[in-house]
Image (cartoon, rainbow, N blue to C red):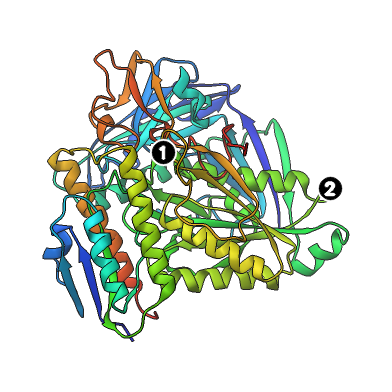
């Protein structure tokens, strides 16, 4: 499969008469965007707010972050199989990206599982989304609706708004075009016979309400491991429907811009032969864990891989999936490198993961989530500070009178995400 | 065929719910440790551990509620399951040493119940071919 990704660099965002791109500025029309979803009877009210890098703005509670893209050719739509989009194979042809812009869905779904994006100050250093021009969709649910209904409404609103904005890039000539291509397994293996054949095992969070991920619209807890072309992710085949601890979170944006996939393509044909992606889930039942880790190892062997990189989303229960995947893949004579974050307590002295196997002898850390920082007050809050102290990472006394927040970095969106989108790590001494 | 199961829980919402072929053991405890310990005792007696003790990706010292699914039949002792539940208890203790469970507002407390119930139900739904 071959995908051309055309990046249209967005330098500024502003409100305008209509939603369009002009000379590097993305104009959005609030009414146009809100009209896309406001008739949903699960939603009471909504508004659009803008946040730019360096502004004194705190966005919270953040549910998801998405990147506006549009399929220009090659079939299918961005985010296939959801919000009325046809289920059609994606990952081929050409896709335009409004690069530098992001849609952020904001609103309290449950009192503890959404996080913070600060646009300036120390908190901004910990999240990749402080560097984006953010179009925030702030959603207020109808009173009395169940959390899962509101989660679905907010998720769907984010998807339709993002696709609508993405359309603005359809007829714009991109500033830069990148080409990503992998072949069928046999042809790909022959292409670079002297390079190690490397695969990527992407574990998708799938435990239940607010812990779900969707693949072509299918709830990932219902899949068995399967093969994906890396370019399918770039067209939104995998979307986030979850609010795990904020720092662990893989928002939709990171599935669209998976740093592991990008890095593997970077080294493709030079240091390694990138053979493809295996997706699997992180279910609650041990029998599912057995079934799916068996499946991961089987696919890795069928692809005749020499090595795999495995990433996870979440902490605790997923650590067991991570270790089962590692052990079974290694038992097939295939080397593994694991990528995860750590929770060793504030002093860093406790065991970092909830599970471990002896085969897990190569692991990249994306930092530890229990570190405490103090984020300065901001001039403006998009959303509400109401739940800061009960969010994961916050505690009694986290929110100070002056509006500053002392909390574990767990509270910051994607601060230690196991996709390695940040700069944090931990090393052995 | 679906296996008959027991849910060990301290979550009132799960305790009130009705599920087919499911018994419940309600543990009155303010945090999840009591649930982990009760489940451990059952696993030592030969019940199989069916759901992961740390389900939910919520740290033990942040989440007041826990539901663990074990088999109704107690036939043979599975050492892997004993190791897994003991590790879960160890991990929970580690977190409690650093920081106690916060006192949540009633609405947030209720959210934790809802999430735990949803996780348990997603497990029960998928329990088709264990």
- Which residue is at the front of the view, A332 or B83? B83
Q: Identify which residue is drawn at 64% across, 70% down.
A: A299
In the image, residue B103 lies at what x, y percent?
A: 18, 38
The x and y percentages for residue A281 are 48, 62
Contact (CB < 8 A) between labels 1 and 2?
no
Element marked by disc 2: loop
A379, B74: nearer the viewer: B74
Q: Nearer the viewer, residue A413 or A354?
A: A354
Q: Residue at x 74, y 53 (%)?
A: A181
Residue A406: tell me if it is visible: yes
Which of the 4 image quadrants contains residue A344? top left
In this view of the protein, can residue A87 be seen by the observer? no
Residue found at x 61% / y 70%: A297
Q: Quadrant of the C terminus of chain A?
A: top right
Placement of B129 over or under A199, stated as above or below:
below
Determine which quarter of the picture holds residue A25: top right
The picture places residue A427, in percent across and down from the top left corner, at 61, 37
Q: Is residue B51 above or below residue A319?
A: below
Residue A345: numbered disc: 1
Q: Earlier in the sequence, mark 1 or mark 2?
A: 2
Q: Is residue A119 left or right of residue A424?
A: left
Q: Are marks 1 and 2 on the same chain?
A: yes
Residue bearing the label numbered 2? A270
Counting from the top left corner in percent of width and height, residue B3 is at 30, 82
Image quarter (top left, top right, bottom left or bottom right) of the N terminus of chain A: bottom right
User: Badge 1, how many Cα within 10 Å: few under 14, some, many 20+?
Assistant: many
> A193 above or below A53?
below
């Amino acid at each position: 499969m071959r995908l051309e990704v055309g990046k249209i660099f967005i330098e500024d965002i502003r409100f305008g008469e209509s939603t369009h791109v002009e000379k590097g500025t993305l104009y959005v029309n609030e009414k146009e965007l809100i009209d896309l979803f406001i008739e949903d009877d699960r939603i009471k009210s909504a508004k659009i707010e803008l946040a730019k890098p360096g502004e004194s703005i705190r966005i919270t509670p953040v549910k998801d972050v998405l990147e506006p893209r549009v399929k220009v050719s090659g079939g299918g739509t961005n985010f296939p199989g959801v919000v009325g989009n046809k289920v059609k194979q994606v990952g081929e042809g050409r896709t335009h990206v409004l690069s530098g812009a992001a849609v952020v869905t904001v609103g309290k779904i449950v009192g503890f599982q959404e996080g913070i994006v600060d646009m300036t100050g120390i908190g901004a250093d910990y999240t990749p989304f402080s560097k984006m021009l953010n179009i925030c969709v702030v959603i207020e649910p109808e009173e009395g609706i169940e959390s899962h209904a509101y989660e679905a409404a907010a998720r769907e609103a984010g998807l339709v708004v993002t696709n609508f904005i993405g359309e603005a890039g359809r007829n714009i000539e991109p500033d830069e075009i990148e080409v990503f291509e992998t072949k069928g397994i046999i042809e790909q293996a022959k292409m670079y016979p002297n390079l190690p054949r490397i695969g990527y095992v992407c574990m998708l969070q799938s435990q239940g309400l607010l812990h779900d991920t969707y693949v072509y619209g299918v709830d990932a807890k219902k899949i068995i491991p399967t093969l994906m072309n890396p370019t399918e992710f770039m067209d939104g085949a995998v979307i986030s429907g979850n609010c795990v601890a904020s720092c662990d979170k893989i928002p939709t944006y990171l599935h669209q811009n998976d740093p592991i996939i990008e890095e593997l393509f970077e080294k493709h044909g030079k240091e390694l032969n990138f053979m493809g992606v295996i997706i699997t889930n992180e279910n609650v039942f041990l029998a599912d864990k057995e079934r799916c880790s068996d499946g991961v190892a089987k696919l890795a062997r069928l692809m005749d891989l020499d090595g795999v990189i495995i990433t996870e989303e979440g902490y605790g229960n997923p650590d067991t999936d991570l270790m089962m995947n590692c052990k079974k893949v290694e038992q097939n004579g295939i080397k593994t490198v694991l990528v995860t974050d750590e929770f060793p307590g504030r002093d860093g002295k406790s065991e970092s993961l909830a599970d471990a196997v002896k085969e897990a002898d190569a692991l990249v850390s994306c930092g530890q989530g229990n570190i405490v920082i103090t984020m300065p007050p901001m001039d403006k809050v998009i959303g509400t500070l109401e739940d800061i102290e009960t969010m994961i990472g916050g505690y009694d006394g986290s929110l100070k009178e002056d509006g500053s927040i002392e909390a574990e970095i767990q509270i910051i969106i994607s601060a230690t995400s196991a996709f390695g989108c940040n700069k944090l790590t931990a090393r052995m001494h | 065929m679906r296996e008959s199961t027991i849910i060990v829980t301290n979550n009132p919402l799960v305790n009130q719910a009705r599920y087919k072929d499911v018994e419940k053991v309600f543990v009155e405890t303010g945090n999840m440790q009591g649930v982990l310990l009760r489940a451990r005792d059952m696993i030592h007696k030969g019940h199989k551990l069916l759901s992961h003790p740390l389900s939910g990706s919520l740290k033990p010292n942040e989440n007041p509620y826990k539901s663990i699914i074990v088999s109704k039949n107690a036939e043979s002792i599975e050492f892997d399951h004993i190791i897994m539940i003991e590790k879960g208890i160890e991990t929970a203790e580690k977190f409690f040493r650093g920081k106690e469970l916060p006192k949540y507002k009633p609405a947030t407390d209720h959210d934790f119940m809802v999430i735990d119930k949803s996780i348990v139900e997603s497990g029960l739904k998928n329990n088709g071919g264990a």
